[in-house]
Amino acid sequence: MAEITRKRTGELLRKLFSILIEAPDGLPASAALEKLAGAVTLTEYEAGVYGSGSRRFEKIVRFATVDCVKAGWLVKQKGTWTITELGRKAHQSLTDPEAFYKEAVRLYRQWKAARDATEELGEEIAGEAAENGSVPEKSAQITFEQAEEQAQTEIRAYLSAINPYDLQQIVADLLKAMGYYPSWVSPPGPDGGLDIVAHPDPLGTRPPRIKVQVKRNSQAVDESGLRSFLALVNEDDAGLFVAIGGFTKAARDAARMQERRKVTLIDLDRLLELWIEHYSKLDDLARERLPLTPIYFLTPR
């Protein structure tokens, strides 16, 4: 007999959705799972651990969230989980936990049938496999997600702990690899809000001058922090704000609405994308500052 029912899985999912709805910018998967564990009383079965030390509860929830992703209710990107508008509506309308999970499973099967019309998905699958989606395809999906989350967590921890001046150098190295010419990198000490100044040409005679601020804080930059930086950016400048902790929705909206000042926001995900894209043009010293090694997984469909 299965140790976890559809109703119980639905209860865990609905509580997870309640937590994520309170975080419109999303939460790291590990943080969301910890909040969920603290908000519910785990059964002895759910609190059990595998040989790896991970709790059975986490596997139950992770497998169930695969259905929610394919249903269009949840987005997982670089280890961050975010509820969609469809997910909010489903949480609001499907208040019965079992009905909530059953609908997610139905939509998952609908997605899978559309992807592979030759596969028979109409039969009922008995036992725990049906309750938690314990099928090889979902196992591969979870393995992929956990590897991506671990990599993201380690890189974030590394960049959050290094000397702020080294992080500035990493950004300056990236600009150089992208074809720009950093003319000034702030030395240790007060910098007045600017960390790097760069130009599109070697002599710095062509506009726009690029003014850069770099933040390694884990906390997201809010609208107030963005406006403090914008005060340093003239209309003929280009502003570049790099923040490891990302930006709040209000800050992103404010940046998008700028009409006279050009500003580009770079969070950790975008910084890494650019670093990987231009890795071949980085010099050896730059690569030592942020050494990355690609590991290839078969991407889940």
Image (cartoon, helix red, strand yellow):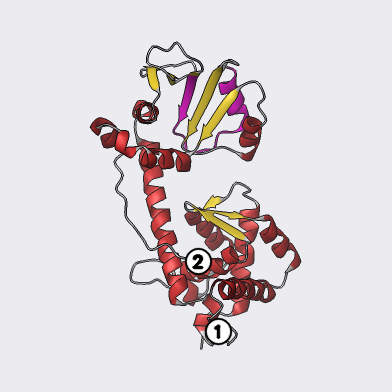
Disc on the earlier residue, 1 or 2:
2
Kind of residue at badge 1: Glu
Is 228 contained in the magenta span? yes
Q: In 3D space, how far apart are the residues under numbered discs 1 and 2 (Cα atoms)? A: 24 Å
Name the secondary structure under disc 2: helix
Magenta segment boundaries in residue numbering: 210-231
Mark number, residue 62: 2
Q: Quadrant of residue 150?
A: bottom left
Determine whether, in the image, residue 210 is placed left or right of residue 180. Answer: right
Residue at the location (36% across, 17% down)?
A: 187
Determine whether, in the image, residue 8 is placed left or right of residue 285. Answer: right
Residue at the location (65% across, 20% down)?
A: 260
Residue at the location (73% across, 69% down)?
A: 95
- 42 relative to 246, above or below: below
Name the secondary structure under disc 1: loop
Is 164 contained in the magenta span? no
**Where is residue 251 shown, x and y percent of the image?**
62, 34
- 186 relative to 147, above or below: above
Foreground of the two, 293 or 114: 114
**Where is residue 206 shown, x and y percent of the image?**
47, 14
Kind of residue at badge 2: Arg
Q: Quadrant of residue 183?
A: top left
Which of pointers 1 and 2 indicates the residue nearer the eye? 1
Determine whether, in the image, residue 155 is placed left or right of residue 96. Answer: left
Q: Is residue 45 visible?
A: yes
Mark number, residue 120: 1
Residue contact between numbered discs 1 and 2, judged by CB atoms under 8 Å: no
